[in-house]
Amino acid sequence: MTDVMAQSPRPDQGAELAKRLVSGIVLAVLAVGTALVGGWFFKGFVLLLGLGVAWEWFEMTRSAGRWAACAAVVAVWFALAWHGSIVLALYCAVMGAVGTAMFALFGRGGEGGGWSAGGALYATLPLAAMLWMQGGEGGSFIILWLFAVVWFSDIGAFAVGRTVGGAKLAPAISPSKTWSGAVGGLLSSALFGATLAPFLLDCGMLAGALMAALVGIAAQIGDLLESWVKRRWNAKDSGKLIPGHGGLMDRLDSLAVAAPVFALIVLAGLMSGGQG
């Protein structure tokens, strides 16, 4: 999530809020709608997100290897969308990161292999996680639960942080984030994750709360990670694609880490525990 706007009133504040609201609703409808419909609608939607994130990362960091990273995104997408192989997808993600780093190191105009490889992984791993989870049994409901937990983590952190305030969480990275907001986001994600778990995941509330807490922590790490990247490259937003919100990375920062973490939870079989 982007940092909280300054409190001083501005003439265009109402219009900016309206843009944020409309854009947020449109994105939420697209995410939920494609997840429910599934199939190629969701696959195509996620592919566009992955390509957009890769493009923004390389635009913001001014690193070489943009097209190599986009090729890695497409390769990972084909591995899961056409072959359904998470092993092949992860292989493509790793080799794509290595190839992108090599391109940056030996190509022209690169900032360095680390940033280029990081951009490839940042775009491909969440893509692989969501496609793999959505393609399994009850995949649409698993994705909806993930979306809900991440969104409520963001909402809880924002609401509690703005209301309570207090000590800063990571002032060198994101001056607006507080420890109270982090705790609020964690509790919010755990509460709603537990409530929705029996309906969307077919598991008990305790298991849902524990999983949601892990996913909520991952979401906040993703938020801080993107803030750190933007601060490192002196960027206010990751892009200008979404009116009132900035870029895709600004909207998907929490999900970028939360999706792979939840995929690991599903892969470990922890979701089946805690019935009743």
Image (cartoon, rainbow, N blue to C red):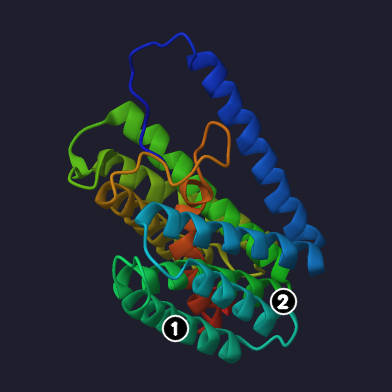
The correct choice, above or below, for 112 with respect to 230 in the image is below
Q: Residue at x 65, y 89 (%)?
A: 85
Q: Residue at x 53, y 54 (%)?
A: 149
Q: Which residue is mark 1?
A: 99
Q: Residue at x 27, y 47 (%)?
A: 231
Choose between 271 and 17: the one closer to the eye.
17
Q: Is residue 2 left or right of residue 272?
A: left
Residue 161 on image: x %, y %: 33, 35
The correct choice, above or below, for 140 with respect to 32 in the image is below
The amino acid marked with disc number 1 is Gly
Residue 270 on image: x %, y %: 51, 79
- In the orientation shown, which residue stands out farthest toward the front? 108
Report the quarter where the N terminus lies. top left
Secondary element at image label 2: loop
Report the quarter where the C terminus lies. bottom right
Q: Is residue 55 left or right of residue 24?
A: left
Q: Nearer the viewer, mark 2 or mark 1?
A: 1
Q: Quadrant of residue 128?
A: bottom right
Task: Report if residue 276 is visible in the image.
Answer: no
Residue 233 on image: x %, y %: 29, 50
The correct choice, above or below, for 102 with respect to 150 in the image is below
Graded by Cα atoms within 10 Å as few (under 14), some (14 to 19) or many (20 or more), the crowding at tag 2 reads some
Numbered-mark total: 2
Q: Residue at x 58, y 84 (%)?
A: 89
Task: Report if residue 31 is visible in the image.
Answer: yes
Q: CA distance from mark 2 to mark 1?
A: 28 Å
Q: Which mark is residue 135?
A: 2
Graded by Cα atoms within 10 Å as few (under 14), some (14 to 19) or many (20 or more), the crowding at tag 1 reads many
Residue 178 on image: x %, y %: 26, 40
Secondary element at image label 1: helix
Q: Earlier in the sequence, mark 2 or mark 1?
A: 1
